[in-house]
Image: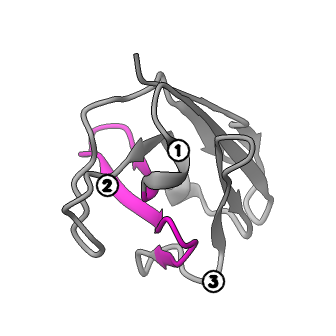
Amino acid sequence: QVQLVESGGGLVQPGGSLRLSCAASGIIFRLYAMGWYRRAPGKQRELVAGITRDSIQNYVDSVKGRFTISRDNAKNTLYLQMNSLKPEDTAVYYCAAFQFNSAWPSPRPLNYWGQGTQVTVSS
């Protein structure tokens, strides 16, 4: 079965950095566009960044210039490097594989979700 396991979250001060990882199994990782979502307390889940099979990156405006999405197909792993973190980045972060017939800026995720990883930005 498909498994997505996120890790790398934690507590960081404003302006700090974190690197999230997502280990994927049960899918042919290299064939899928992938993305990161986040859900802040009391808010709906929102798309943060996406990367195509060919490693073309896309970001929502709120994280452009601060976050970098990347992938390692040999390791079946997706990454999110987060720099210049702000308190409003506090959320649980999830990775997802996108359906084949969908594309940025409105990709449709497959209905497979991991437990997420908590990112807290606070002084």
Query: Is residue 73 one of those drawn in magenta?
Result: no
Rate crowding at label 1 as few (under 14), some (14 to 19) or many (20 or more) other CA atoms within 10 Å: many
Q: Are marks 2 and 3 in contact (CB under 8 Å)?
A: no
Left or right relative to 117: residue 40: left
**Numbered disc in front, either 1 or 3:** 1
Nearer-N-terminus badge (1/3): 1
Nearer-N-terminus badge (1/2): 1
Question: Could you give the CA–CA distance between mark 1 and mark 3, rounded to whole angstroms?
Answer: 26 Å
Q: Quadrant of the N terminus?
A: top left
**Image spot of residue 111 (x, y percent):** 25, 33
- Name which residue type carries label 2: Glu
Residue 59 in the image: above or below residue 32: below
Which residue range is magenta in the image? 33-58
Left or right relative to 88: residue 12: right
Rate crowding at label 3 as few (under 14), some (14 to 19) or many (20 or more) other CA atoms within 10 Å: few
- Judging depth in this view, the residue of 114 and 102 nearest the camera is 102
Left or right relative to 85: residue 98: left
Q: Residue at x 43, y 59 (%)?
A: 33
**Image spot of residue 5 (x, y percent):** 57, 26
**Residue 123 seen by the camera:** no
**Image spot of residue 101 (x, y percent):** 19, 62
List the residue tagged with mark 1.
Answer: 29
List the residue tagged with mark 2.
Answer: 46
List the residue tagged with mark 3.
Answer: 65
